[in-house]
Image: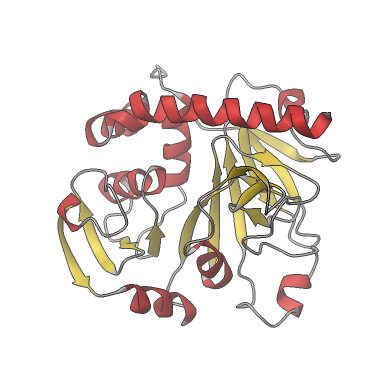
Amino acid sequence: MTVKYTLNELLIIVAAREIHNDENIILGVGLPTVSGALAKSLHAPNANLMMESGIFDFEPLVRPNHIADAMSCRGFSCSTDLFTAFTTTYRGFVDVCFLGVAQVDKFGNLNTTVIGDYFNPDLRLPGSGGAADFISYSKRTVLTMRGGNFVNKLDYFTSPGYLEGGSARDDSGLFPKGSGPSMLISQKGIFRFHPETKEIYLSEIHPGIAVDDVKKDVPWDLMIDDNLKITEPPSAKEVAFIRKFAPTESAGNALAIELATANIMKKMAARQQS
């Protein structure tokens, strides 16, 4: 019997399934940390969870309030600094990073800086932080989009995906060969990137969502996988873990944030059409 779950829980669980045993993972606060805790508890006990601040191999106790929240851990193997965390990434030791998306184009380039004109913005966003560094040098990047937009052109280029597509990222000589975004998890489905063109395509669709519901959010002719799948629903164990570990990520505060973000994005979409 399928357990009832919220959309937010589904996103957390899908992200957690991308974490494998013995991988080094940089996690941000919020959804990524809950995904990391879930993975470490249920299927990847030897995953090395890392905070941007330099806390390595931590054992989550509760959801962190910030990137240096050592009090949220049962313990950790090493506590260092931002410089070491970033240089660890530059040297190729980070397997996976998770990044949130405000705007994304068809080649996985990201904007998390500003909506509208930079000097007279409609909305000022948090900016890059470590995002540009992590997507540049991690072996792969998982993108999460809870209220962002697909756009033909970013209002601001914050973090590099596959640049102009094709071999552009590798040809630039600026990034490790084969790195870049591997997937994007949205509220409607799972997207991946074509191995040659690097254009994003719909790989899986969440239960109850129609393909046309996805396509109407994308301003270009979205590619659909010939073998389009339905996202595997959460198990009772996965849902139970989230509700115990971080109940506000199931609903509560997280739901309020999602509703506010959705309202902002609706206004942005109306502005772009006017």
Q: Is residue 274 left or right of residue 100?
A: right
> Residue 213, image x and y in percent?
72, 24
> Residue 56, image x and y in percent?
27, 67
Name the quadrant of the C terminus. top right
Which residue is nearer to you in this view: 244 or 29? Answer: 29
> Based on the displayed image, in which of its 4 quarters is residue 146 positioned?
top right
> Residue 81, image x and y in percent?
29, 74
Q: In this view, does 91 lie to the left or right of 37?
A: right
Up/down of 259 relative to 117, above or below: above
Structure colour scheme = secondary structure
> Based on the displayed image, in which of its 4 quarters is residue 194 positioned?
bottom right
Which residue is nearer to you in this view: 137 or 271? Answer: 271
At horizontal 66% and vertical 26% (from top left) the residue drawn is 266
> Residue 222, image x and y in percent?
81, 40
Name the quadrant of the N terminus. top left
At horizontal 41% and vertical 22% (from top left) the residue drawn is 5
At horizontal 58% and vertical 70% (from top left) the residue drawn is 136
Q: Is residue 130 left or right of residue 113?
A: left
Q: Residue furthest front?
A: 120
Residue 206 visible, this orientation: no
Residue 64 visible, this orientation: yes
Up/down of 52 relative to 37, above or below: below
How many numbered tags mark residues here?
A: 0
Q: Is residue 97 left or right of residue 76?
A: right
At horizontal 63% and vertical 60% (from top left) the residue drawn is 158
